[in-house]
């Protein structure tokens, strides 16, 4: 089903890492079959270099699996929301570029601090700190904060083990609380990523422009995007005065 579309999506997905728009398994490209209305999206957790047409999953507009041997991407409902509200959209490209995610992280930090929630320490975990040190350094420079890295490469499993030890309790060799278990079972690497003062100054300037554009287009300061959409709709309907 939709085999040609699956092959095209594999080719499009491979362009994302080539253009530094994603890292590891992040990001997604999906497409809607023009005749069936079904959506094709990649499976969850598939590495780009291993991606094949069989890793594409077909779902209906409610996210129900129609065809495929894998679980669809966790982004599937975000894509479906766009398709449901934009009948004119036939494809969605969702990227996790290094700079966009770093700037977004800094925006979140500043939002917390603006609302009197202190952000005092960053500890990173998972595959990215192990696989992409450049990404970690960019985040340290953009956010102006030192990034620490967990020693375990399997932090979700370690977290489960910690709660298991708490459930067992101290009488049988466990712990009475997660606060007692954490410093005993979890470790932080000595290696950290510290902001580079020179790069930090450059990113500060870029982030200032990013914030201006973010507010300008995304928070109603200027409704140019809405006007462009209305203009396009008017031309499609033949009403050029819209």
Image: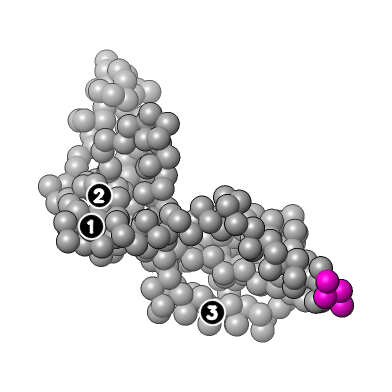
What mark, if any, has residue 12 been given in the picture? Answer: 3
Where is residue 219 drawn, in percent x and y? 57, 50
Q: Residue furthest top?
A: 171
Bounds of the magenta segment = 236-241
Whole-angstrom CA distance, mark 3 to mark 2, is: 34 Å
Residue corresponding to mark 2: 144
Taking 128 as reference, is 192 left or right?
left
Q: Specify the principal SS of the magenta part.
A: loop
Taking 2 as reference, is 215 left or right?
left
Residue 128 painted magenta: no
Q: Let me know if residue 2 appears in the view.
A: yes
Q: Nearer the viewer, mark 3 or mark 2?
A: 2
Q: Mark 1 and mark 2 in contact (Cβ < 8 Å)?
A: yes
**Image quarter of the N terminus:** bottom right
Q: Mark 2 and mark 3 in contact (Cβ < 8 Å)?
A: no
Q: Earlier in the sequence, mark 1 or mark 3?
A: 3
Secondary structure found at label 1: helix
Q: Nearer the viewer, residue 183 or 108?
A: 108
Placement of 6 over or under 135, stated as above or below: below
Q: Residue furthest left?
A: 190
* Quadrant assignment, res 97: bottom left
Residue corresponding to mark 1: 200
Taking 23 as reference, is 88 left or right?
right
């Amino acid at each position: 089903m939709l085999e040609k579309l699956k092959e095209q999506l594999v080719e499009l997905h491979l362009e994302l890492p080539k253009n530094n728009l994603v890292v590891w398994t992040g990001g997604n490209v999906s497409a809607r079959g023009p005749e069936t209305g079904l959506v094709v999206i990649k499976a969850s957790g598939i590495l780009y270099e291993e991606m094949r047409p069989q890793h594409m999953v077909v779902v209906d507009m409610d996210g129900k699996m129609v065809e495929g041997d894998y679980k669809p991407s966790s982004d599937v409902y975000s894509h479906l929301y766009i398709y449901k509200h934009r009948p004119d959209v036939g494809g969605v490209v969702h990227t996790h570029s290094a700079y966009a995610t770093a700037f977004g992280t800094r925006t979140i930090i500043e939002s917390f601090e603006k609302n009197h929630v202190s952000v005092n320490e960053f500890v990173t975990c998972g595959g990215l700190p192990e696989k992409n040190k450049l990404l970690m350094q960019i985040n340290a420079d953009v956010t102006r904060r030192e990034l620490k890295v967990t020693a375990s490469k399997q932090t979700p499993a370690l977290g489960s083990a910690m709660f298991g030890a708490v459930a067992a309790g101290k009488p049988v060799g466990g712990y009475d609380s997660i606060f007692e278990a954490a410093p005993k079972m979890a470790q932080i690497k000595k290696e950290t990523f510290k902001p580079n003062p020179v790069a930090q100054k450059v990113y500060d300037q870029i982030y200032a422009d990013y914030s201006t554009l973010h507010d300008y287009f995304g928070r109603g300061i200027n409704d140019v995007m809405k006007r462009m959409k209305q203009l396009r709709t008017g031309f499609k309907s033949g009403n050029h005065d819209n």
